[in-house]
Amino acid sequence: MADIKRHMRQGTSLLWMRNTPPGPAEINLMENLHRFVIQVVHSAGEALDRLRYGKDAVVFAEFPLAGLEPADLLEAIREASPRTPVVLRDPQGTVADAVRLVRLGADHFMSGPLDEHELIGHLEMAAEKLRVTGVAAVAEAEPWKRFFIGESRPIREVECIIRLAGPKRATVLITGETGTGKEVVARALHHASPRAHLPMVAVNCSALPESLLEAELFGHTRGAFTGALQQRVGRFEQAHNSTLFLDEIGDMPIDLQAKLLRVLQEREFQRIGSSETVRVDVRVVAASNANLAEKVAQGTFREDLFYRLNVVPVTMPPLRERASDIPLLAHHFLEKICRLESIPLKRIFREALDRLSAYHWPGNVRQLENAIEKAVVLSGDRLDLYPADFPLPDFGARKPLSATASVMLLPETGLDFEAAVTNFQRTMIEQALERSGGNKTVAADLLRMKRTTLLAKLRNLETPANVVSIKSA
């Protein structure tokens, strides 16, 4: 019960400025703004006080407002809270008004009859902008956080480990599926450390054969082997006083693992063809998409090396376990790709974001970035991206649960059928909301039901007094 209440209350704050209390049409619109916690305010003073002393919010102002012009409101909001996105609406507004107000800092200006679909799209884009600028502000205090896009619990847990382990010299082992961002974690660890003034050195252990990999890591002298025409400094030596990232460590040949173990233990090695001992101060970060514990059991990975590497373990969550981060990641990649291509920033419609959020993403963050880039390229000069711009392959779609996956056995003494069904529904809904980060559209997709059906079940599982209320000032 508590989890359902928590998920119903979470969301981006929306200050809705209007002269009159909401009518039936506005109440219905509020029901569809399910990603926001709405506060209706009737004066500029009250809105500005909330912005000065409350948490970040999106402002939606409907004109006319008594004694207030749109330009004056924008100026006051910029002084009170420079990062606050503002969406304005004036049914009598003109194109000239729109151009002028956007230049003054409004995120969007709407005129004419209210288009609910358009308004929801503008407000959700404003909310994503607020989240992106919030991440940027935090990154100013902790520069390594610029590597992370996301606010889900799994990402917060990874950030916590980086904050604690980054300044230390302890070896870190990063595991996770392909495309989850293991190298991103390695770079964040490096930039969170006192070694950040030097470049991180990276080696892909699966990209080179054993003979070349040893030379790559430890270096060699001139004439040490055929083709060694001159002395070469290895990656360990290059990473002296810095960080060495060993990617796909699970693919390292077993013979070379023994030499790596000695370096980790003694912090010294010999170049191939030399008897001279080279001492280094290197912080090692390793990564693998394979289960190293299973490799140890199979005899293809040294147990002592595994424990030497696994001092500080970090597990990167697959994208399907952090679905609430997908809209933020999508906007980040969209901005990045449009900037690299030197084209105007495109917009992703809400339905497209819902489609992306509901997908399984077997290729994780890397696959999402590729999907965004493909949509940007193939959409041509069109500024808006729709669900059809993301033709996701079927093999990544979520598979239905097995008919016997959640079988309950009837106790010998029987049970209260209605109570059992209610508890099962509550448990499934809580899990869906947890997995979707509170996004009810994604949660409904996980449960194979319409969003309206999910909302109805949420109301049935809550007493009327517990259902999230729309705060009205």
Image (cartoon, rainbow, N blue to C red):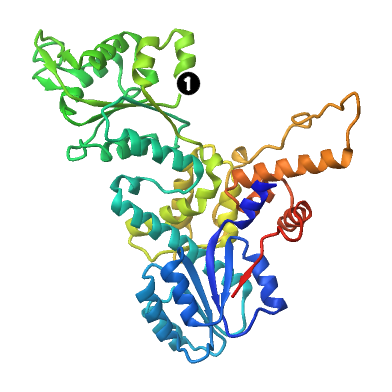
Q: Is residue 272 visible?
A: yes
For residue 292, which quarter of the picture? top left
Residue 300 vertical position relative to residue 179 in the rendered view, above or below = above
Q: Position of residue 344 (x, y in %)?
A: 38, 66
Which secondary structure lies at badge 1?
loop
Whether residue 388 appears in this view of the structure is: no
Q: Residue at x 35, y 20 (%)?
A: 309
Left or right relative to 37: residue 163: left
Please tell me which residue is depicted at 39% across the width and 80% down the height of the picture: 76
Q: Nearer the viewer, residue 226 or 169?
A: 169
Quadrant of the rendered structure where residue 217 is?
top left
Residue position marked by numbered label 1 in the rendering = 291
Name above or below for residue 387 compared with residue 48. Answer: above
Query: Where does the C terminus fall, quadrant-wise?
Result: bottom right
> Residue 149 appears at what percent x and percent y?
42, 48
Q: Is residue 37 left or right of residue 164?
A: right
Task: Give the amino acid at mark 1.
Answer: Asn
Residue under the image location 49 percent in, 89 percent down? 94
Position of residue 240 relative to residue 364, above or below, is above
